[in-house]
């Protein structure tokens, strides 16, 4: 593989020009452990806070920027209905860039 400053710059520029939209509907990734019981519970804002603290997402220019859209209320996928699926599809369409 060829390694050159131009290639590195192109990769860096490509990485930062990308943006990811995360639609967080609920579930394990955004659950916070309850220190008393050890059980996991969905907590609004927890996933956003955790991702903001992950240096690897912000320190490397190859990492894309991201936006998080958090649903209210947070739902487990087992509790979703077709109306929730439609909302997700509409949010994908509205945020497709």
Image: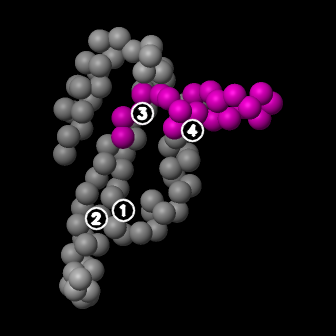
Q: Secondary structure at mark 1?
A: loop
In the orientation shown, which residue stands out farthest toward the front? 1
Mark 3 packing: few (<14 Cα in 10 Å), some, or many (20+)?
some
* Residue 46: mark: 4
4 relative position to 23: left or right = left
* Residue 15: mark: 2
Q: Which residue is mark 3?
A: 24
Q: Percent x, y for residue 46?
A: 57, 38
Residue at x-position 77% and y-position 35%: 35
- Between the C-alphas of marks 4 and 2, the distance is 26 Å
Is the N terminus in the top left, top right, bottom left or bottom right quadrant?
Answer: bottom left
In the orientation shown, which residue stands out farthest toward the right? 36
Point out the tag, 3 or 4, that comes first from the N-terminus. 3
Q: Percent x, y for residue 13?
A: 24, 71
Give, as a single range, the part of the protein colored magenta: 22-42
- Between the C-alphas of marks 2 and 3, the distance is 22 Å
Point out the tag, 4 or 1, that comes first from the N-terminus. 4
Taking the image as drawn, is residue 9 in sight?
Answer: yes
């Amino acid at each position: 593989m060829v390694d050159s400053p131009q290639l590195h710059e192109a990769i860096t520029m490509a990485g930062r020009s990308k943006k990811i939209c995360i639609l967080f509907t609920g579930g394990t990734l955004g659950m916070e452990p309850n220190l008393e019981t050890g059980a996991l519970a969905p907590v609004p804002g927890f996933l956003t806070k955790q991702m903001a603290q992950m240096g690897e997402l912000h320190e490397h220019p190859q990492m894309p920027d991201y936006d998080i859209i958090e649903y209210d209320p947070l739902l487990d996928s087992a509790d979703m209905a077709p109306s929730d699926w439609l909302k997700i599809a509409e949010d994908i369409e509205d945020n497709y860039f």
